[in-house]
DNA sequence: TGACAAGTGGAGTAGCGACTCCGTATTTTC
DNA sequence: GAAAATACGGAGTCGCTACTCCACTTGTCA
């Protein structure tokens, strides 16, 4: 992404501006949600609208770049924690961290939801990345008996999105997080049937 | 809401149209989310745009009416189930039903989130209504030992919104629901500390 | 049944947001 | 230090959407 269509490397100022736009877009979308206007992004970045559209030809592509950046950062954090001594603690710490970040960043919640199960074009390569990173955190925690064994990265991602949503819009995020944590722990012989369904 | 500004009762056709518009709006917003256009609502209702705006002077007021209707129906269902013989089953059945409905109705998830903690003007009277109805379902379930005692209606509502969001956008709603249920059950002496936080 | 109030429909208005275009400015290259 | 290539900025275009206005229709009441 640092070369122009003709194969040549981007000019220095262009590179700088690209970064400024991306950073501004992250801020703006985090604060106002993905419906914030492109003009606001340009203003925040201190560039003209034309520049924004030169680097990201549609609003969607800008959004995609932001989401990918967020997810990559997430995957990075997960990978980092994966080498911690206590796998259970690492997993729950990661979960809590993501939720607390998402509470103030609408865009993160949306990114999580999109990465959820359907790997759309937007997050085509990053979705699996995130899933793998979460898997690397989840499996050791399961082996250590800190997390129930009957779920996979997809369920964790979905739950992450849901709890983030709840934490962001409603209050009481701590309580909701506690409930989620308890549900994630291994459930002892409670054979429950709960015929509950429509 | 069935009288004109001048205090007289609404004309028969006006009453009919009002109902048609409300029904169409519920459908449209459920399918396309709250950003669907007012014109689409009018088309679906088989009336002119002018008529929609006569009954609901702003789009926001239309949205509000739809959300209130959804929440009232929810509260109604909760009250109905409250008299079931097994309080635990009633509670979990209600929870599952809401989530499965919300999966196909974006508007419901948004309504839940809004009803969450801050009683905005939109759902000013209905928010508490829902909370009370959920409370009437929750407390007996807690007394029966089917639901952990350390949470209240607010937490349940928040969780409901979060799980609905997860179920609607990602797949694997069943697994996520299972996790939530397990987290909602009384947690035996697991004094856990989970120093997990930022 | 006729007169008047109430309601309807949809063309029109206003404003916003995504995206384009091109004269000007900045880099790079030789 | 020019010339050529590249990038910039922002006024302008286009389409969409909430909302208004009013000539016309329908319901109500005596």
Image: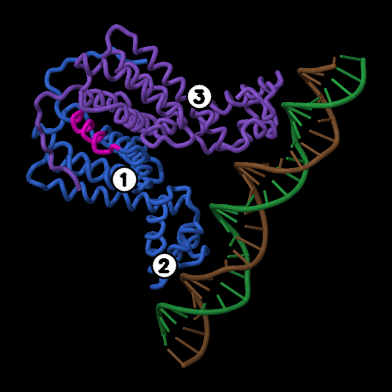
Chain colours: A purple, B blue, C brown, D green
Q: Which mark is residue B102?
A: 1
Q: Which residues are magenta?
A: B172-184
Tag 2 residue: B17
Q: Are marks 1 and 3 in contact (CB under 8 Å)?
A: no
Same-chain status of marks 3 and 2: no
Give the label, 2 or 1, closer to the camera.
1
Total marks shown come to 3
Tag 3 residue: A69
Q: Main secondary structure of the magenta part?
A: helix
Q: Image height check: is B188 above or below B21?
A: above
State the image quarter where residue A120 is shown. Answer: top left
Whether residue B165 can be seen here: yes
Whether residue A172 can be seen here: no
Q: Image height check: is A7 above or below B14?
A: above
Q: Judging from the image, what secondary structure is the residue with disc 1 in?
A: helix
- Camera-nearest residue between B141 and A107: A107
| Chain letter for mark 2 | B
């Amino acid at each position: 992404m640092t070369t122009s269509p003709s194969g040549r490397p981007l000019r220095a100022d262009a590179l700088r501006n690209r970064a400024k736009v991306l950073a501004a877009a992250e801020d703006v979308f985090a604060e106002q949600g993905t419906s914030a206007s492109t003009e606001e992004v340009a203003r925040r970045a201190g560039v003209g609208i034309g520049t924004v559209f030169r680097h990201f030809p549609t609003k969607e592509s800008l959004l995609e770049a932001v989401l990918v950046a967020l997810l990559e950062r997430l995957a990075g954090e997960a990978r980092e924690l994966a080498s911690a001594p206590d796998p259970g603690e690492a997993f729950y710490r990661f979960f809590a961290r993501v939720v607390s970040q998402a509470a103030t960043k609408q865009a993160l919640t949306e990114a999580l939801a999109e990465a959820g199960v359907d790997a759309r074009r937007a997050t085509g390569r990053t979705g699996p990345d995130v899933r793998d990173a979460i898997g690397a955190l989840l499996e050791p925690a399961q082996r250590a008996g800190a997390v129930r064994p009957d779920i996979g990265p997809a369920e964790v991602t979905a739950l992450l999105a849901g709890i983030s949503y709840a934490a962001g819009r409603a209050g009481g995020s701590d309580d909701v997080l506690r409930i989620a944590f308890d549900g994630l722990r291994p459930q002892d012989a409670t054979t429950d049937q709960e015929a509950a369904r429509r």
